[in-house]
Amino acid sequence: MSADDASTPVPPPSKFVDPAPPPKAKKPRRWRGRFTILLLVLIAIGIALRVILAVALPSVLRKVAARYDLNCDYERSELYLISGNVGMWHLTLTPKSGGVPLLAAGYLRGDVSALNLLRGRLVVYHVEGDGIDVAIDRDEKGEVPILKQFLAAAPQPGNSAFTMPNDINLDPPFRIDSFRGNRVRAHLRDRSVTPPLDTVLEVNIRLADFGSQKRPTQFDLDATAQPLLDMLRVEGEGTARGKSIDATMNVFVRGIHPKPAAGYLKALGIGPTGDDISLRMTGTVKTEPTGSVQVGNGPTTRPTGMKGAIVLSDIAAVCDGVEAVVTKSRPLDP
């Protein structure tokens, strides 16, 4: 060994250093995958329900209309995927026997139950209408053909409208939880009064719980009909279940013009005098089945017809600012 090698310090041996451990792999977040799957399933269900609405609604509408011997048609419909509502343009209800439409709606938009459509039932949670025209005709005998048609629920040919070929069931074949109608025009023709009446009522109407098995149907309407009257307001509720109808209503009329309304005032015992008449009253409508016929060879029977009573009570009329008539009760021929 040389002197230079002896004088050069020898570095100490380096210590062994372990390499840094590799980073741990993060576990996949399973909740994200599950949430994505759930979201896709909900979207698929939503699309399926919309398809059901588009396919099943027309046939169910026509089925319900046929129950009352009516044809149901419309020009076009639109499905709103985000809200799930259905819009319909120019829907009409026309008697199968022909004639003018009983109802023509310019536009309807509603929230319809898709699951009930699969069962063949029409359940509407909410519907609004605009530009609706209704035709109401009362003949010389005081009968309203469309009302008889509804009560008879599509009677068979050859039977009187008041003769029930089947057991009476006044439960409506559809349900509407809420309805709002704006700019409803009701064309009223009444040939049972003298002079005959032919006028158009401009109506705003609200209907709730129609066809409900839990709550009575509630309704209110505001109408004007020139030159007949300035303002009509009706509020009431009622039920039509099984074999009976039971309804009550409060009526207030302001600005009745005596000459055009002479026929109706006479039925209330009021002469067509004065220039301005206001009227308030309470009305009740009740029906019940009549008669019976045996079904088969057993003891079961079914009714053969219906009878009803319309009673107006607490009638108060004010003519030109002076109270003219107060009547406790007055029955009318249904």
Image (cartoon, helix red, strand yellow):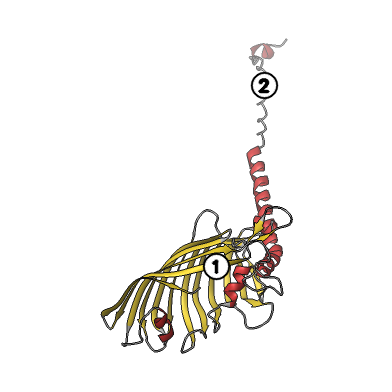
Q: Is residue 37 above or below residue 225?
A: above
User: Quarter holding the N terminus?
Assistant: top right
- Please count the marks in the image: 2
Q: Nearer the viewer, residue 133 or 194?
A: 194
Q: Is residue 143 above or below residue 289?
A: below
Left or right placement of residue 250 versus residue 155 in this view: left
The amino acid at mark 1 is: Lys
Query: x%, y% of residue 279?
Result: 35, 76
Say which residue appears at 67% left-offset and 21% top-offset: 18
The answer to which image quadrant residue 99 occupies is bottom right
| Number of other residues with Cα within 10 Å of mark 1, as a class: few under 14, some 14 to 19, many 20 or more | few
Q: Which residue is mark 2?
A: 18
Secondary structure at numbered mark 2: loop
Q: Is residue 104 visible?
A: no
Query: x%, y% of residue 129?
Result: 54, 72
Say which residue appears at 67% left-offset and 25% top-offset: 19
Q: Is residue 218 above or below residue 3?
A: below
Query: x%, y% of residue 68?
Result: 65, 70
Query: x%, y% of residue 138?
Result: 54, 81
Say which residue appears at 53% left-offset and 75% top-offset: 130
Q: Which mark is residue 307?
A: 1
| Number of other residues with Cα within 10 Å of mark 2, as a class: few under 14, some 14 to 19, many 20 or more | few
Q: Is residue 329 above or below residue 186?
A: above
Q: Nearer the viewer, mark 2 or mark 1?
A: 1
Secondary structure at numbered mark 1: strand
Q: CA distance from mark 2 to mark 1?
A: 103 Å
Say which residue appears at 65% left-offset and 50% top-offset: 42
